[in-house]
Amino acid sequence: MQGFAGEQHEVTTLGGGCFWCLEAVYDELMGVISVESGYMGGQVTNPTYQQVCAGNTGHAEVVRITFDPSIISFKEILQVFFTIHDPTTLNRQGNDVGPQYRSAIFYHSPEQRATAYQVIKEIAEAGIWGRPIVTEVTPAADFYIAEEYHQEYFARNPYQGYCRAVIAPKVAKFRKQYISRLKKQAAENR
């Protein structure tokens, strides 16, 4: 199956604004094996950060997540996704504006596609956001890994202005809501 990275691992690719924010959260989630920041969904081969930020390549800033579905399901990955970004703003997350910041699920299998639509329907019916969800659900395309300085950005730059003002509050909210699902929490309980 295309969504699987190995016998026990599955891959998904998500866009929810700045990839630094998503990476910082998913790095701490139990069952997540790896998180890579990159670009997907555009028409330029090997785009650079500057090209993507200009908004002309069609790419979204994304994270490619490899996870162990015996520990965390794709549905749970998406539940976290819809908690840590606003899926109701088209081509925007906070002050980050442009198609590169769109809310997107790039599915890697028919099962992921079905689950994505199911979760979106459940969230919409629950009225959690109060506005229509505009998250794009599209087949995974070529993934281009972002430049090295984007990888583990929050972990390496916790005192940088954007990290303190934007990423840290998202990570804190995530930690509070999902404390029992944190890798650190699991290690402490052993």
Image (cartoon, grey):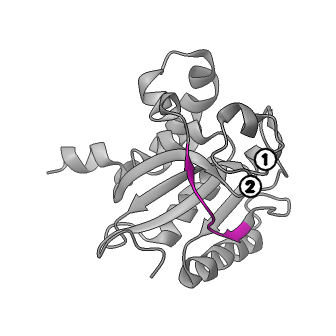
| Residue 60 belongs to magenta span | no
Name the one closer to the observer, 168 or 105: 105
Which label sits on residue 42? 2
In the rendered image, residue 157, in percent from the top left (x then y), is placed at: 48, 20
Q: Residue at x 32, y 71 (%)?
A: 6
Q: Earlier in the sequence, mark 2 or mark 1?
A: 2
Residue shown at 75% from the left, 45% from the top: 100
Q: Residue at x 80, y 63 (%)?
A: 133
Q: How many numbered tags mark residues here?
A: 2
User: Up-down: is 130 above or below 22?
Assistant: below
**Residue indicated by mark 1:** 57
Quick check: 29 above or below 139?
A: above
| Residue 16 vs residue 108, the one in the foreground | 108
Count neighbours of disc 2 (C-alpha within 10 A) and say few if under 14, some if 14 to 19, many if 20 or more.
Answer: some
Highlighted range, magenta: 137-145
Q: Position of residue 65 (x, y in %)?
A: 46, 56
